[in-house]
Amino acid sequence: MYHRIHHRKPSISLRYIEATIGLFDDQGSPRPKSLFTLTIPKRMISSNNRETHNARWFEQLTTYRQRVAERSPPVVAGKLSRMVGLTLEAVGCRAPIGARCVVSTATGKRVEAEVVGFSGERLFLMPTGNIQGLEPGCRVTPLSHGSTVPVGMNLLGRVIDGSGKPLDGKGPVISDHKVSLTGAIINPLTRKPIHAPLDVGVRAINALLTVGRGQRLGLFAGTGVGKSMLLGMMTRYTSADVVVVGLIGERGREVNEFVQKILGEEGRRRAVVVASPADYPPLMRLHGAMLATSIAEFFRNEGLNVLLLMDSLSRFAQAQREIALAIDEPPATNGYPPSVFAKIPQLVERAGNGDEEGGSITAFYTVLAEGDDTNDPVADAARGILDGHIVLSRTLADSGHYPAIDIEASVSRVMTDIVDARHLASARKLKQVYSLYQQNRDLISVGAYQRGADPRIDEAINLNPDIMNFLRQNVEEAIDFPRSITELTQLIR
Ligand SMILES: Nc1ncnc2c1ncn2[C@@H]1O[C@H](COP(=O)(O)OP(=O)(O)O)[C@@H](O)[C@H]1O
Ligand SMILES: [Mg+2]
């Protein structure tokens, strides 16, 4: 708790000198009870025995000093001095980075903001809500509680925003635990290694790009090639205990479509959706991604296997870019300030396995990238820190091949550690056969290839229709892990 220590003018009566030290609460209003009152009998001061007098003073002051030291530092309210673009500037108050403040107007409007930087005596704040109506001189009061969010089992089935408020009209979310938005750092040496596969219910992924429990993957694709549909399929068909979906920076319409159509009533039952659409302030979009991760961490700590789907990491990076540029951080790579590339690993590293007792967070982060666009620094950064990537191809999507997974360009870096030798051999063989067909596709399709010229190409031609069927999957159909493997090994002997 933060308190402002307030010295009232000492009242001097004939017999006593009285000094009261009072308290202010977080909002700056005086508290009814005073901390303590010093009452010094005048006769003590006039006492001849100076030593006794000094000793008593010393004793009393020591006790009071201790009491003061036990209190949290005082909170001093400041005022709003400037606002440019999205950034609020406050003077006259002190608060650490990440602290929350309330900006209140004379008319009683209150807007929460978070400290995102400082310069000398000035604090830079980012609002988490609508800033309409703020004016110069508004009171800025740092809040004692940091960014903690309520979490609990009853989040299942709910749709909330980046601040934890319900969006689904099903009443308030009553939660028993509070966790930090930034999460706790896991010692890399105590993390459980990835050793078991997670069934995601999608045949091409289960069989050829096997996902491990605790693995973090990127889903790289341009717009409109089926990312949301694929995430929806995984949400409905995965064997994970809980699915947490972060919809960050999407259009509002897409959020609704995902929740109502793609997820449906059945998919929502064991899912939590955190949505911070594009029209939310950038801080709320950052918080949306962080909150989704905090919720996943909560379920992992409960010993559950969690599937975390974050759509999209690119929009998360863009939100951090907006904030960083607004507080004058210089842009570096393609307009992205360096802090963006610090935030991405901070978010992604929170997923994965916990220590031995805990559950796991298997995570998919979608990254907006058009096929061969290798210039996007966010895609580059993501590739570097994730344990695999699944690339969706526009060419496949355009030809009606769904899910449009480009199996040549995709890789799961943990697959070799978690599947048996036969499965691995079949998956490699299928990829080779598929690649060989693709390399010779033009020749084959114009009839320039003579059958019998190369037995490997003959085999590729024979297997191609079955392989294409194997890779395609209807949205309504769930294909579990054992069935995926059986079908793979039947196809490739
Ligand atoms: N598995 C699928 N089966 C059939 N159509 C699909 C499938 N995945 C995507 N589509 C088509 O592609 C469109 C865009 O998909 P969507 O998942 O919204 O893309 P993104 O999220 O990448 O923008 C859908 O409206 C749908 O018509
Ligand atoms: Mg989408």
Image: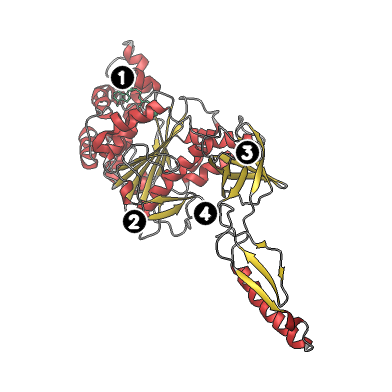
Q: Which residue is mark 1?
A: 400
Determine whether label 1 and label 4 are within 8 Å by CB.
no
Q: Count of labels shown?
A: 4
Please tell me which residue lies in front, 211 or 432. 211
On screen, residue 311 versus residue 471, left or right, reads: right
Q: Which residue is mark 2?
A: 302
Position of residue 253 measured from the top left corner of the image (x, y, whole percent) = 38, 26
Which quadrant holds the N terminus?
bottom right
Q: Is mark 4 within 8 Å of ligand 2?
A: no
Q: Earlier in the sequence, mark 3 or mark 1?
A: 3
| Mark 2, other Cα within 10 Å: few <14 / some 14–19 / many ≥20 | some
Q: Amino acid at mark 3?
A: Leu
Q: Earlier in the sequence, mark 1 or mark 4?
A: 4
Q: Amino acid at mark 1?
A: Gly
**What numbered label is drawn on residue 145?**
4
**What numbered label is drawn on residue 88?**
3
Determine whether label 3 and label 1 are within 8 Å by CB.
no
Query: Label 4, label 2: how many angstroms apart (C-alpha)?
Result: 25 Å
